[in-house]
Amino acid sequence: MNAFDLHIAYVCWGDDGKRRPILVISQEDNIVQAYAITSQYCNKSENVRSHLYSINDWAVAGLAKPSYIDVGTTIDIPIVFVETSSIGRLSDNDKVQLGTFIERRSQ
């Protein structure tokens, strides 16, 4: 798995979880570090919305509808919960824009 690849993974939180797209940040041994991707925006709080980067080239990335990368928290996922084949890759334009978005949030 490579940085900026999109995969489907089973993401757990507490006693629950679901299959969802993720953006791979890195992989070390049996852990994939990633950002969750969501298609929900309108029903999120203003605080959560401030963490969501809107993917411009979502279809190129292999997503079925407009989606957002949640950069508020990185998640560590055991590799066994990540499907091996990628659904797509973030476009070069989105890579640059995502970097700018993250940089602005940290200022």
Image: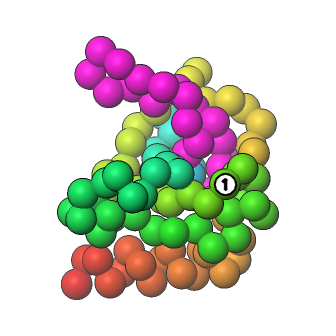
Residue 29 visible, this orientation: no
Residue 60 sits in which quadrant?
Answer: bottom right
Range of the magenta residues?
1-22
Residue 102 visible, this orientation: yes
Residue under label 1: 65
From the viewer's perspective, is 29 left or right of 65? left
The residue sitting at 75% across, 61% down in the picture is 59
**Predominant SS of the magenta segment:** strand
Q: Residues within 10 Å of mark 1 (few under 14, many from 20)?
A: few
Q: Which element is circle 1 on?
A: loop
Q: Position of residue 62 (x, y in %)?
A: 75, 53
From the viewer's perspective, is 81 left or right of 65? left
Q: Outermost residue toward the front?
A: 42
Q: Position of residue 53 (x, y in %)?
A: 46, 68
- Residue 38 against residue 60 in the figure, above or below: above
The residue sitting at 24% across, 65% down in the picture is 46
- Residue 52 against residue 84 in the figure, above or below: below
The residue sitting at 56% across, 58% down in the picture is 67
The residue sitting at 51% across, 39% down in the picture is 32
From the viewer's perspective, is 11 left or right of 96? left
The mark total stands at: 1
100 or 27: nearer the viewer:
100
